Image (cartoon, rainbow, N blue to C red):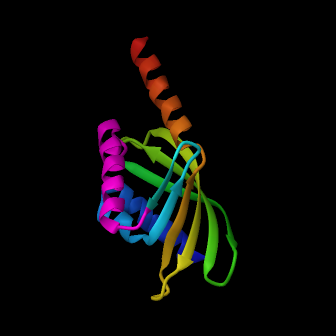
Amino acid sequence: MQQINHFFEIYANALENYDTKGLAFLYNIPCTMLSDETTAMFNDTVKLEGFFNQGAGFYKQFGIALVRPEIWNRRELTGKIMNVKVNWQYFDSNKTPMYNCDYHYVLKLDKKEQWKIILSVSVNEKERMEEWKNAQKHALAQ
């Protein structure tokens, strides 16, 4: 289980450093990303990295500097497949909370016994991000 904690600490570090190659490395190819609005399947690491470049641009634009994963639960589905629920917490450079959101991941051990994400489900990131952006606009208007 410590491996799962360590895995998401590496993930958070890659997010904080806008390391899109590092993020892509944590995913199995092929992989799928789901949300209520979209389904994206990636069969190519370069395209996955391009997807993460878009997210890194958002993080830079809005000043996200610190990312913390809080693992809410994990369930071993088989000896090599794990289901993990993570609450991601995003902070600015002053460590002021910005927003948080929930994800579910299915991870699988690869041939080298490394965990890789095969499925990523965004539960509420779009909604939480929009709430935060709207609150920022409202605060600036006052």
Identify the magenta region: 42-64
Q: Residue furthest bottom?
A: 112
- Residue at figure coordinates x 64%, y 68% from the top left: 83
- Magenta stretch holds residue 55: yes
Q: Residue furthest top?
A: 142
In front of the other: 107 or 1: 107
Residue 65, percent from left and from top = 35, 47
Report the quarter where the C terminus lies: top left
Residue plotted at (46% across, 17% down)? 138
**Above or below 32: residue 61:** above
Q: Is residue 123 magenta?
A: no
From the viewer's perspective, tell me whether residue 2 is left or right of residue 56: right
Which residue appears at 57% of the width and 57% of the height? 70
Residue sitting at x 35%, y 53%: 51
Left or right of 103? Residue 21 is: left
Q: Is residue 108 above or below residue 34?
A: below
Quadrant hosting residue 50: bottom left
Q: Is 20 placed above or below 112 here?
A: above
Q: Position of residue 99 (x, y in %)?
A: 50, 39
From the image, give the main secondary structure of the stretch colored magenta: helix
Q: How many marks?
A: 0
Where the N terminus falls, by quadrant?
A: bottom right
User: To which quarter of the image does residue 77 belong?
Assistant: bottom right
Query: Percent from the top left, x then y, of residue 9?
Result: 46, 65
Relative image position of residue 40 (x, y in whole percent):
47, 55
